[in-house]
Image (cartoon, rainbow, N blue to C red):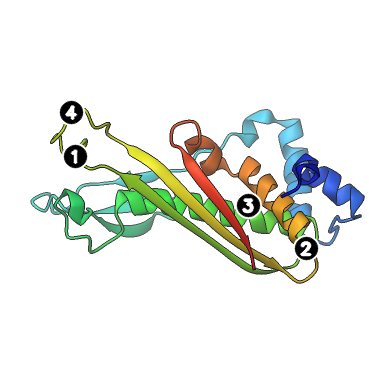
């Protein structure tokens, strides 16, 4: 990536390339939300939620999490075989990785929609690495927690080139709530592949 490319911001790019999708559903919804939040800042504060209510407490390896306080969507969960689980359902690390993948991919799509970037391909892969000796208390010198995460993104478009897709990626990373929450705590390597 050239040094000049880094200087582009999504706003500057949109202005320079005359990209603003006024017909975009994202733009319409964001404009409505801006008015609401400008009138009442408290309405911009949101709470996401998940609840695990113990069932089958004699089985320490499985549970069920209910996500979204309105929908209460159930997701069966299990523990990773590295800590003695059966690895037969999504693990907490899988769910953390999924949160980052979903947040970044949806952020990419919303920004692309706003800027009339026609995406033909997206793929976001996340891997989280943890040394489980810490959580199992096998070695007290090993920290409890993920030591690193790896984020790989593939993007393809029919109407813009590599420079614009690099800028889109940078804008999405800056706007991704989960990425920005995790970044101060966990080293995250990121790779963008233009397809």
Residue designated by label 4? 140
* Disc on the earlier residue, 2 or 4: 4
Residue 17 seen anywhere in this rendered image of the structure? yes
Residue underneath mark 2: 161
Which residue: 72% across, 44% down? Answer: 33
| SS category of the residue bearing label 1 | loop
**Rendered location of residue 143, percent (x, y):** 27, 31
Q: Please report contact status of discs 1 and 4: CB closer than 8 Å, yes or no.
A: no
Q: Give the quarter of the image for residue 119.
A: bottom right
Screen quadrant of the C terminus = bottom right
Left or right of 126? Residue 147 is: left
Q: CA distance from mark 2 to mark 4?
A: 49 Å
Spatial CA span between label 2 and label 3? 19 Å
Tally the numbered discs: 4
The residue labelled by disc 1 is 133
Assign a secondary structure to mark 4: loop
């Amino acid at each position: 990536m050239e040094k000049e490319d880094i200087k582009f911001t999504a706003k500057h790019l949109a202005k320079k390339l005359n990209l603003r999708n006024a017909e975009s559903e994202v733009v319409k919804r964001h404009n409505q939300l801006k008015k609401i939040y400008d009138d009442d800042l408290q309405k911009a504060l949101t709470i996401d939620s998940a609840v695990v209510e113990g069932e089958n407490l004699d089985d320490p390896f499985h549970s069920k999490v209910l996500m979204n306080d309105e929908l209460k969507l159930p997701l069966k969960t299990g523990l990773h075989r590295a800590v003695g689980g059966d690895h037969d359902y999504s693990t907490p690390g899988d769910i953390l990785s999924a949160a980052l993948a979903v947040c970044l991919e949806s952020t990419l799509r919303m920004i692309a929609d706003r800027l009339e970037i026609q995406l033909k391909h997206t793929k976001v892969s996340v891997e989280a690495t943890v040394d489980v000796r810490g959580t199992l208390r096998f070695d007290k010198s090993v920290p409890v927690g993920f030591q690193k995460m790896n984020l790989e993104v593939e993007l393809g478009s029919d109407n813009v080139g590599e420079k614009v897709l690099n800028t889109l990626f940078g804008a999405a990373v800056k706007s991704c709530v989960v990425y920005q929450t995790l970044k101060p705590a966990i080293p995250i390597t990121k790779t963008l592949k233009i397809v």
